[in-house]
Image: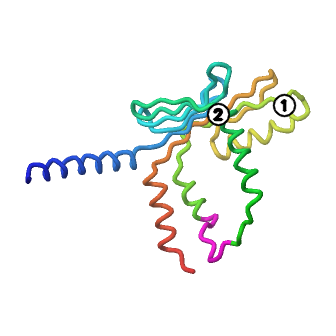
Amino acid sequence: MKIVLIILLVIAGLILLAALYLLFRPVHLVIDTSAGQYYAGWNRWLNVRLTEEEEHWGFRLTMFFYRRFFVLEKMIIQEGKNEEEKKGKKEGKSKGRRFFRFKYVRTALKQVRVKLFYLVVDTDDFVWNAYLFPIMQLIRSTFGMRTYVNFTGNNVLRLHLEASIARVFMAGKFNLLTHKS
């Protein structure tokens, strides 16, 4: 009986350690229009990618050893059916104090790290490109982001964001604890 209890405690401890590891492991959001990469997730543990397979756009979900492809068109059609059902129902007013505030979102977004930001813009109009050129130079010199105006027809966005779930949650929790109403 004691051996079974010890084994269960070891398994529960391993599950808790795995959950803490995933909680402090950074989540990556990568958008690269030149290479056609759009994904978010924890490195090999959990990934969601926007890809085109068999002439259908959709999301590829990879979770440990589980893989599944969700077709985007089917998801949009199912969402449209749910909206029609909701129109018939009467919505009541939510009572109580509004809990969601913009400053909580702002403090959570401050915890997100921008690993890479590279933007090349071309509007195919020389006048608009000329208007954008000083704005892009100001952004580059002020914020240190790599932004360029291109006169050759190329538009590129490379964005790599990194955030730890625990870091974002603790920033929001600290703000909730120190908020006086």
- The secondary structure that dominates the magenta segment is loop
Q: Is residue 82 above or below residue 73?
A: below
- For the residues marked 1 and 2, what is the alpha-carbon distance in whole angstroms? 17 Å
Whole-percent x, y for residue 110 in the image: 55, 55
Q: In the displayed orientation, state which residue is furthest to the left.
A: 2
Whole-percent x, y for residue 159 in the image: 61, 36
Residue drawn 60% across the image and 27% down it: 37
- Residue that label 2 marks: 118
Residue closest to the eye, 135 or 169: 169
In the displayed structure image, the side of residue 67 where residue 101 appears, left or right: right
Q: Which mark is residue 97?
A: none
- Residue that label 1 marks: 123
- The stretch of residues the image draws in magenta is 94-103
Q: In the displayed orientation, state which residue is furthest to the top.
A: 54
Identify the image quadrant of the C terminus: bottom right
Task: Name the amino acid type tagged 1.
Answer: Thr
Numbered disc 2: secondary structure:
strand
Task: Name the amino acid type tagged 2.
Answer: Tyr
Verify whether residue 97 appears in magenta: yes
In the displayed structure image, the side of residue 118 where residue 135 appears, left or right: right
